[in-house]
Image (cartoon, rainbow, N blue to C red):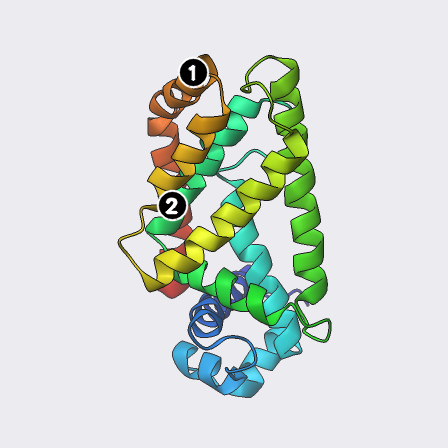
Amino acid sequence: MARPRGNYAFTAARRDLIIRAALETFGEFGFNGSSLKQVAEVVGISEAGVLHHFGTKSNLLIEVLRSRDDHGTELVPMQGDDGIAFIAGWINLTEYNVNHPGHVELFTTLAAEATSSAHPAHQYFLERYGLVFGVTKANFENMLLRGQLRDGVDPSDLAVNLIALSDGLQLQWLIIKEVNLVEQISGFFKAVLTPEAWADVAGLRAQSAPDLAERIAAIEASLQESAA
């Protein structure tokens, strides 16, 4: 006999709620410094209930990181060769992160822990950095071919510098809130793009602001539904 459809919806909602609780817990205490019991207490269920949905703490961690990435790809196009759209998306994601410090804290804390090859998220971060570097470099290469970068810049170096700047700024921002993430990231792009290309980025951000607001609202709604 088929189970009622509502059971599946309940299970999905419960999983989302656990992921959200784990995001906050892992972000505050790190993976090594937190326990499934803490996550379970936030949700209001038993530790066994968490394990029922995810099997292990490591599995839960990977799902938390994938959930974070899903929100990021809503804002930054990871496919295609439109460098202007990619950069506009990167700035949009930075702006989103400013309003969601828990996501930044999660990433920064876990990335530091995952430098150990024994950490369950080590492979995830290894693959993630490879993907982000490859996509970023490819977009800069396309922009170079289109004359959208200033003279004397190297796409590979720009990709390395941008990722390092973003990660470093996020750490500074968590400690010193006065650091303006959006302003600093925008300043980097403005320094390496031609004036015309930067104007295109600014124009695209202004033009797509209503659509961006809708996408962010959809992300917020999904988070609120998980917390309900």
Contact (Cβ within 8 Å) of mark 2 with mark 1? no
Q: Is residue 96 above or below residue 211?
A: below
Q: Residue at x 44, y 12 (%)?
A: 196
Amino acid on which the number 1 mark rests in the picture: Pro
Q: Nearer the viewer, residue 214 or 135?
A: 135
Residue 176 x, y percent position in the rendering: 31, 60
Q: Residue at x 39, y 58 (%)?
A: 172
User: Spatial distance from mark 2 to mark 1, Cα to Cα?
Assistant: 25 Å
Residue 127 x, y percent position in the rendering: 71, 53
Q: Secondary structure at mark 1?
A: helix
Looking at the image, is mark 2 or mark 1 earlier in the sequence? 2
- Looking at this view, name the residue that lies furthest to the front: 152
Determine crowd level at label 2: few under 14, some 14-19, many 20+ residues with C-alpha closer than 10 A. some
Tell me, yes or no, if residue 4 can be seen here. no
Tell me, yes or no, if residue 161 can be seen here. yes
Q: Secondary structure at mark 2?
A: helix
Nearer mark to the viewer, of 2 and 1: 1
Q: Give the side of residue 19 with respect to residue 207, left or right.
A: right
Tally of numbered tags: 2
Q: Residue at x 48, y 54 (%)?
A: 168
Q: Which mark is residue 96?
A: 2
User: Residue 11, located in which quarter of the rendered image?
Assistant: bottom right
Q: Which mark is residue 126?
A: none
Determine crowd level at label 1: few under 14, some 14-19, many 20+ residues with C-alpha closer than 10 A. some
Task: Look at the image and tell me in which quarter the C terminus lies.
Answer: bottom left
Q: Which mark is residue 195?
A: 1
Residue 226 x, y percent position in the rendering: 42, 61
